Amino acid sequence: MQVGSLGATVFEVSDRLVRTFAEFSESFGGRIATHEVALARPIGEFVGPAARKVSIPITLNRQLGVSPIDDIAVLQEAAETGRLLPLTIAGRVIGGPGALWSIEQADVNHRAFDARGDSIISDVSLSLALMRTADTPAALSSTVAKSGVTRER
């Protein structure tokens, strides 16, 4: 049964394979600018949403049907080339329609090895950053138009 996916990496559980996560955490918020006022308290202004982040710790275990080395290589290639990846959990697109995430950081801890030195169990902690959503261009255009900023040539 598919639990979710990050690009081509499918999180799934079946009788022959387990590639999933035990935790999933998100962070989000707003950006607040502070304007100093002489002889008065500063005034706060909401200027837009803050960057969204996701953390996913994954355990890759060869005894559960996955290849830690191969899975890590796929994640490493995506991180080091800046590939933008859709993230879905339980059929829900994380970040909203058209959301694309980038692997900002991947920390790998190889915990067990076979007789040849190949990793049997590896823990991978992924830190993802939201890069785009379906409304990113429209939101950017709208903000620039409202601000009155023009582009000089």
Image: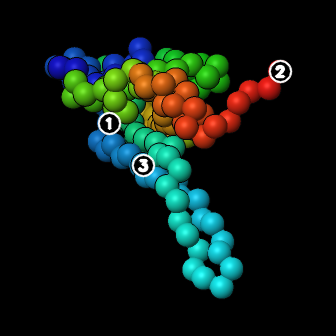
Determine whether the residue tagged by mark 2 lies in a helix, strand or loop: loop
Instruction: Give the quadrant of the N terminus.
Output: top left
Residue ID at (57%, 32%): 145
Q: Residue 33 location, x and y as percent? A: 58, 59
Q: Label 2 sits on what residue type? A: Arg
Q: Which residue position holds label 1?
A: 21
Q: Label 1 sits on what residue type? A: Phe
Q: Is residue 102 visible?
A: no
Q: Residue 57 location, x and y as percent? A: 40, 41
Is tag 1's residue or tag 3's residue first in the polypeptide sequence? 1
Q: How many marks?
A: 3
Q: Nearer the viewer, residue 146 or 97?
A: 146
Q: How is the image coloured?
A: rainbow
Left or right of residue 98: residue 32? right
Determine whether the residue tagged by mark 1 lies in a helix, strand or loop: loop
The Cα atoms of the two marked residues, 1 and 3, are separated by 21 Å
- 10 Å neighbourhood of mark 2: few (<14), some, or many (≥20)? few
Q: Which mark is residue 153?
A: 2
Is tag 3's residue or tag 2's residue first in the polypeptide sequence? 3
Residue ID at (34%, 29%): 96
Q: Label 3 sits on what residue type? A: Phe
Q: Which mark is residue 65?
A: none
Determine whether the residue tagged by mark 3 lies in a helix, strand or loop: loop
* Closer mark to the observer between disc 1 and disc 2: 2
* Closer mark to the observer between disc 1 and disc 3: 3
- 10 Å neighbourhood of mark 3: few (<14), some, or many (≥20)? few
Instruction: Give the quadrant of the C terminus.
Output: top right
Q: Is residue 1 visible?
A: yes
The Cα atoms of the two marked residues, 1 and 2, are separated by 50 Å
Is tag 1's residue or tag 2's residue first in the polypeptide sequence? 1
Q: Residue 100 location, x and y as percent? A: 46, 24
Q: Which residue position holds label 3?
A: 28
